[in-house]
Image (cartoon, coloured by chain):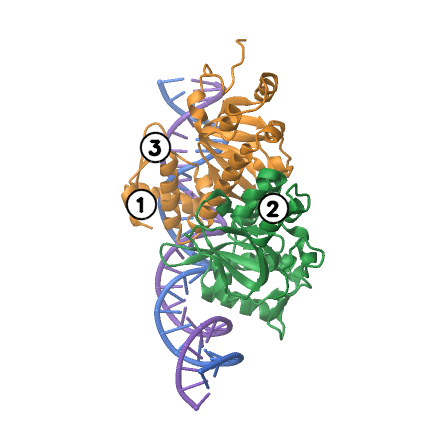
Chain colours: A green, B orange, C purple, D blue
DNA sequence: CGCTCGTTTGACTCCTTTCAATCCCAGTGG
DNA sequence: CCACTGGGATTGAAAGGAGTCAAACGAGCG
């Protein structure tokens, strides 16, 4: 096995995606000595995860936070009646699992929705860093606020109005976070859990959007949106 | 005018309600000297506000955060189409306006829903404190997570299922946060903006709940809930 | 090829909205 | 003291959107 390189190392292959990382700037300006720095970075794990992979489960207590370098993660909340709602989506640059920093159990399960490149950072690393580098708090607060904004947009944009309008909002949101304006072809069940309708309604709407040419399904299972058409529905 | 007393002062009349304050424990263990402490506390303002009072407006940049000592505050989001949704409710012990700490504009308007006792704390005080007392960050993160939990419960409990179920959830939530199990008699328009239905539907449901004796309206404009009956609807 | 799993579609039901009218109560002014 | 008035609450009737239940369809896979 080749010697492991870390995100602060120039030679690390994934370096360019570190730009949005919650702890990177902190680590860069670290006052830690070399031994401490190595100890911190050793705990960090970076890898790709396939669609469907569960990063953590609702109800459990997490020991890590996660930074998303690419891809998309859904926050799924299981309901008492057996149903489920997706309460947030997270994309490149977001940090999830922050409740673990406070020692609180996970309110939702975090599941990869689109193949994702993710850094796992032990909470102990955060605690170690914050003693010497209080600026990590600023990063954490930014991420907390971003999660709050996303959750609120799920209420105002994806939880309000007719089903058709909500779906248009969802597609535009995904498009805005996508690269090359190619969004993943979601499961109808996920769409339903996001905009709060039944799977059948989600399917009907998507089929309808396709017929009206608001969306174009590509060979590679991606979707291209007619943004202007979708905006006209809102 | 009698000399102003502060929340750290034993003689301050509102002292008992400080227990949940975001900055109180921080100030108590302050490493600030007396002059600095006085400077910090001078900026803090505490007073009662009537129902309908707007603490801050959507779109504006705030200079303060607010700690709720009693009462209830609604976070109102105005929609493009002229409608409005209430995305969160905040009660005793909550801190709101945290986005101002990050210099971000308000995503919502904060409006008093039930006569409330509120401390206004300038962001400059937070910035001054955090240099010397990093433990204030822990308090802020706790409050951010609490806001996130509340927003998510609006999606999962108040934004999912039939209107009747949602209203039951809302009443139970208000009841849990109320003292002596007496909740305020909300405007039908507010109920509608919370559970995402029309004002008429909210009115119909409330009238129906009253007839079925799930709620009892008291002389003093308060409401008493039959919690078991409401729980059976969920 | 037969299976499974997800998608699509149909028919019917039911809940919620829409548009309107009426009611109720508190505050106002004659 | 009582009619007047305005804002919120209530109620009705009709229309429409989403849910429910069920069946057919299609792609991927052992």
Quadrant location of the N terminus of chain B in the rendered image: top right
Around disc 1, counting alpha carbons within 10 Å, would you say few (fewer than 14), some (14 to 19), or many (20 or more)? many
Around disc 2, counting alpha carbons within 10 Å, would you say few (fewer than 14), some (14 to 19), or many (20 or more)? some
**Element marked by disc 3:** loop
Left or right, residue B39 beside residue B189? right
Residue at horizontal 45%, vertical 45%? A104
**Element marked by disc 2:** helix
Do badges 3 and 1 share one subunit? yes
- In the figure, B70 relative to A88: above or below? above
- What residue would you read off at disc 1? B230
The picture places residue A16, in percent across and down from the top left corner, at: 70, 57
The picture places residue A26, in percent across and down from the top left corner, at: 65, 44
State the residue lying farthest toward the front: A35
Left or right, residue A104 beside residue B179? right
Left or right, residue A76 beside residue A13? left
Tag 3 subunit: B
- In the figure, B64 relative to D25: above or below? above
Left or right, residue A48 beside residue B72? right
Earlier residue among tags 3 and 1: 3
Tag 1 subunit: B
Around disc 3, counting alpha carbons within 10 Å, would you say few (fewer than 14), some (14 to 19), or many (20 or more)? many
- What residue would you read off at disc 3? B182
- In the figure, A85 relative to B133: above or below? below
Viewer-side residue, A40 vs B149: A40
* Separation of residues labelled 1 and 2 (CA atoms): 55 Å
The picture places residue A91, in percent across and down from the top left corner, at: 60, 56
Residue at horizontal 59%, vertical 43%? A129
Do badges 1 and 2 share one subunit? no
Residue at horizontal 52%, vertical 18%? B6
* Separation of residues labelled 3 and 1 (CA atoms): 15 Å
- What residue would you read off at disc 2? A36
């Amino acid at each position: 096995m080749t010697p492991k390189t870390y995100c602060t190392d120039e030679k690390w292959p994934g370096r360019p995606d570190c730009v949005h990382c919650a702890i990177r700037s902190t680590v860069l300006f670290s006052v830690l000595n070399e031994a401490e720095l190595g100890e911190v970075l050793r705990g960090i794990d970076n890898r790709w995860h396939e669609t469907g992979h569960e990063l953590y489960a609702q109800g459990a207590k997490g020991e890590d936070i996660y930074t998303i370098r690419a891809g998309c993660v859904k926050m799924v909340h299981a309901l008492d009646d057996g149903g489920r709602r997706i309460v947030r989506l997270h994309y490149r640059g977001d940090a999830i699992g922050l409740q673990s920093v406070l020692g609180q159990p996970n309110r939702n399960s975090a599941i990869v929705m689109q193949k994702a490149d993710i850094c796992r950072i032990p909470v102990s690393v955060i605690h170690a860093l914050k003693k010497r580098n209080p600026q990590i708090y600023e990063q954490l607060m930014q991420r907390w606020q971003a999660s709050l904004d996303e959750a609120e947009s799920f209420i105002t944009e994806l939880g309000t109005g007719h089903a058709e309008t909500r779906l248009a909002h969802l597609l535009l949101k995904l498009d805005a976070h996508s690269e090359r304006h190619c969004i993943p072809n979601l499961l109808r069940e996920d769409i339903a859990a996001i905009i709060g309708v039944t799977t059948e309604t989600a399917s009907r709407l998507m089929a309808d959007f396709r017929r009206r040419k608001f969306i174009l399904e590509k060979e590679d299972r991606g979707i291209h949106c007619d943004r202007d058409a979708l905006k006209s529905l809102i």
